[in-house]
Amino acid sequence: MTLDSSFNRRDFVKTGATGLSAALVVAGKAFGARPARAAGGRVLGANDKINIGVVGVGGRGSYLAREFNGIAERDNDCKIVAVCDVWEKRKREHAERYKCDGYLDHREVTSRKDIDAVLIATPDHWHAKIALDAMDQGKDVYLEKPMCHTIEEAKQLSHTVRETKRVLQVGSQTTSADQWHKAKKAIADGMIGQMIQSQGSYHRNSVEGEWNWKIDPAAGPDGKGDNYIDWKTWLGPAPKRAWDADRYFRFRKYWDYSGGIATDLFFHVVAPLNVCWSEPQFPQKVMASGGIYVMKDREVPDTFNVMADFAKGHTLVLSSSMANSRHIPGLIRGNEGSIVMVEHGEFEGKTDFITVYPEKRVIGDAYKSKFGADEIRIPVEAKPRWAHMRNFLDCVRSRQKPTLDVETAFRAQVTISMAVQSYREGRVLYWDEKNLKVMTKAPKA
């Protein structure tokens, strides 16, 4: 079965509606007619297992499938019942591993009435389409980061979650770590005063060069048996191209399928920072810089920097290189103190504590009487890597909002997608929150 991979990236209509909810209602109409939706998901009894379909079982999808299967073995409350991949070898191997059905076409998974939740770990350019198809069929969704490939897709996902009332968890696992939630409370308690700046980084270095994963020379659209790859389907909404093994196996190096550092790595920084802040926030102004300084085999930069300003009066500063592994501490500065969430700078790394450093020269007696004048270490609870998946499964049953819900992820996605656009266009960009669109000039108040 082949897939009609056309995907209409519908533009928002201009609207004078105010507020996110109103704008998204209008947005839903602008997206055009979508398929008739299933009437909610399967009603789960207390002893019913959550049936999971996995779409995309490459490196990341294979890992996530193992994590969900580990939860199944420990808790016996979920089960992988289907896998899907456009590479026959991956499809077959994972179907055999989990003793389940295997498909080349994701619609075979999303349309199955016995499936409750769909795990999506394809290249970025397919995330939105498959998630929307799953929600249209009454499925909940665990959607690997980044949430999607474009801001228009992020809008549509936000609207569809609101409309269908499905649970959507974006798979930046670090957001379930305790340090971000402890930092949020410390900031809310007044331990740093007024927030003025957040900073983070993501640095790597390797002999092979980032994202240069191994290529199987026998695999491709002309391959037989296990070597067959459905290239046409894999391209999907991306521009049509002749088979290119580098693009398939190393997709993060190309703009058609990825935003490079911004979408692969900075999502793991911007999403947890949004968790720390008083509330998730859209940026007001975004600018990005960098270049291809060392790794000449790609379209995306190997060194990338972002600055973003927010309407509530603070700035985000991000630094990254794939040619140097030295991080900077992940922290949030305020006028009365700073809170360091990850001293080592690795946003996905573990830490035993976060630290508040008061601004000793300016804090007054009220601050000192409440918090003291010396640095304060706040213990952090250790959580397993699969805590984020456990949270998703719990929300499938309870229908509560997951840790990295669609609205928080929407705001993170806008920041990083605007950073990609700013870099590619070489200019500062602005966000019109009233109409949910990117502007080249600051919107009128």
Image: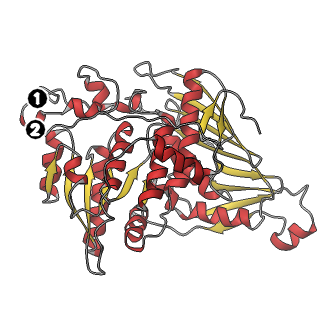
Residue drawn at x 53%, y 46% is: 26
Residue 223 tag number? 1
Q: Residue furthest left?
A: 225
Q: Residue furthest right?
A: 365
Residue drawn at x 68%, y 59% is: 278
| SS class, disc 2 | helix
Residue 7 locus on image (x, y percent): 34, 35
Residue 40 locus on image (x, y percent): 33, 65
Residue 332 tag number? none
Is residue 401 placed above or below 33 in the rendered structure? below
Q: Quadrant of the C terminus?
A: top right
Is residue 154 placed above or below 425 in the rendered structure? below
Q: Which kind of residue does numbered mark 1 sit on?
A: Gly
Between marks 1 and 2, how big is the CA–CA gap? 8 Å
Quadrant of the image occupied by residue 190: bottom right
Name the residue beneath numbered marker 2. Answer: 226
Residue 314 locus on image (x, y percent): 74, 46
Residue drawn at x 79%, y 56% is: 337
Residue 102 locus on image (x, y percent): 15, 51
Is disc 1 surrounded by few (<14), some (14 to 19) or many (20+) residues within 10 Å? Answer: some
Q: Are marks 1 and 2 in contact (CB under 8 Å)?
A: yes
Asked whether residue 269 appears in the rendered view, the answer is no
Q: Which kind of residue does numbered mark 2 sit on?
A: Asp
Asked whether residue 16 appears in the rendered view, the answer is yes
Q: Horizontally, is 60 left or right of 328 in the view?
A: left
| SS class, disc 1 | loop
Q: Horizontally, is 156 left or right of 55 in the view?
A: right
Is disc 2 surrounded by few (<14), some (14 to 19) or many (20+) residues within 10 Å? Answer: some
Q: Horizontally, is 164 left or right of 155 in the view?
A: left
Residue drawn at x 84%, y 65% is: 373
> How many callouts does the rendering have?
2
